[in-house]
Image: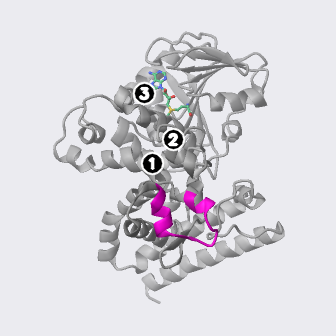
Amino acid sequence: MAESLSTLRRLADIITQGVETMERVYGTAGMGLPELDHPFQREDPAEALREDPDIAGAVKNIMAAASQLMATVGDPVSMAINSAFAFHVPSCLRAASEINVVEILREGDPKGVRARDIAAPSGNDPDLVERILRLLATHHIFREVSPGVFANNRISSTLDKGKETATLFESREDRLDGTSGVAALVESAAENTFRASAFLADTLLHPTRGKLPCNLAFRTDEPWFKYMQRPENTYVRKRFAVAMKGTAATDSPEIILQGFRWGELPGGSIVVDVGGGIGHASMTIAQKHPTLRIVNQDLGPAVEQSRILFAAHDFFTPQPVKDAAVFLMRYVIHDWSNAQAISILTHLREAVTSTTKLVLLEKIVPSVAGDDLHHAIPGAARAQAAPPLLPNWGVASASTYMYDMTMHDLVGGVERTVNGFIEILKESGWKLAQIHHCPPSPLSHIVAIPV
Ligand SMILES: C[S@@+](CC[C@H](N)C(=O)[O-])C[C@H]1O[C@@H](n2cnc3c(N)ncnc32)[C@H](O)[C@@H]1O
């Protein structure tokens, strides 16, 4: 058999094996696989089963093999051109979310709602709304149940803001407050990151020191975080904060407890969550390990709440806590360039005791071609997919690479490889001592000690 045909068969076999694993695990648990056509129910025990390692492995293999199969059999010219036009997906998705389609469908007839009734509350053209939803339904986001009639499905329903449509239309300013953060993340990414990303090539063709795609897109010399502080960007800033909650929606909150052994720290040890934001990581640690003393530092005001001390601190200035057992940073270092990251880490290094540890929670970027698994660092080695799959499982790992470019385009940050972490840690007086991966999450605990 020609090589390409045998590859096709091997990819199809991977999918078959994955499906068999899913049938076996769901069958043994006496549960059905959640249906694509039905709205997502987070509390459904069948959703929790996705954490099962066999299911998580099967899902990765099926996604990687299915996308590789499509790339293999699809017309290459169409594949390239469709990739270039794929921007219509986020553009339509944001449009649907902005006019609260998900909530209109949730409140409407479960059998489906006509485009004219979906368009009416926002006063939009029903024909245009129908075309937007048709493009999305073609990508399995929403269902077109009969011509011009739409319903939510498993994917669209994750954007549900959980409020009455009347409330959502009443005040645009507050519509995202208190929501899961998924719609905020989608709208923020599909507006701000999307606009910034459109200027990536321009920054390569006309590189100007210090200018990021975001600076060209928003015609400002200010960094993104500063630009968001302008009074006219209040809505964008509020939405961004809610969107940060959305970034955690794909991970269990318990992930903070999975790697580094917080329970082995002596009672009374101080854990400083540097750049801890609203403190959800601090809160999870404090609840599970009540004898630890947690300090959550961020730019905001200082308060004491739920046994956590919220302290105002700029991490580009000397670290005031000099007796910490752990400096923790979740999703902070990826916001910064190497020079800035080294400055932040150096301030922490200057505040250590002989036993202080640094714990970074970040994604570690694998190469698509596979990595050298023989790093001297305990825990660094990670499973790789067997051929013919891409070693990094291709699109099943896409979010890591999407976040990497998001960091670059908006803030000049970077999702780092293992070597990237080794380098910035070494430059700031730390040594990477241990890595705990937390599959199926792409997040890892990176533990460093002072040298
Ligand atoms: C991506 S968020 C991560 C927040 C939190 N660690 C989490 O996992 O949700 C980055 C955080 O860094 C904070 N930050 C940005 N610049 C800072 C600075 N100079 N000093 C302290 N915190 C800063 C932001 O306010 C934000 O809360």
Kind of residue indicated by mark 1: Glu
Cα–Cα gap, marks 1 and 3: 28 Å
Residue 88 in percent (x, y) is at: 36, 62
- Front residue of 130 and 42: 130
Cα–Cα gap, marks 2 and 1: 9 Å
Q: Which residue is mark 2?
A: 243
Q: Which residue is mark 1?
A: 187
Q: Is 161 placed left or right of 200 in the picture?
A: right
Q: Is 213 placed left or right of 154 in the picture?
A: left
Q: Are marks 2 and 1 in contact (CB under 8 Å)?
A: yes
The image quarter containing residue 271 is: top right
- Front residue of 107 and 44: 107
Q: Any atom of ligand 1 within 8 Å of the CB at mark 3?
A: no
Q: How many marks?
A: 3
The image quarter containing residue 34 is: bottom right
Could you tell me which residue is drawn at 51 percent across and 41 percent down? 243
The local secondary structure at tag 3 comes to: helix
Kind of residue indicated by mark 3: Ala
Whether residue 366 can be seen here: no
Q: Which residue is mark 3?
A: 341
Kind of residue indicated by mark 2: Ala
* Sequence-first disc among 2 and 1: 1
Residue 217 in percent (x, y) is at: 26, 42
Residue 33 in percent (x, y) is at: 71, 69
Q: Which residues are magenta?
A: 104-121
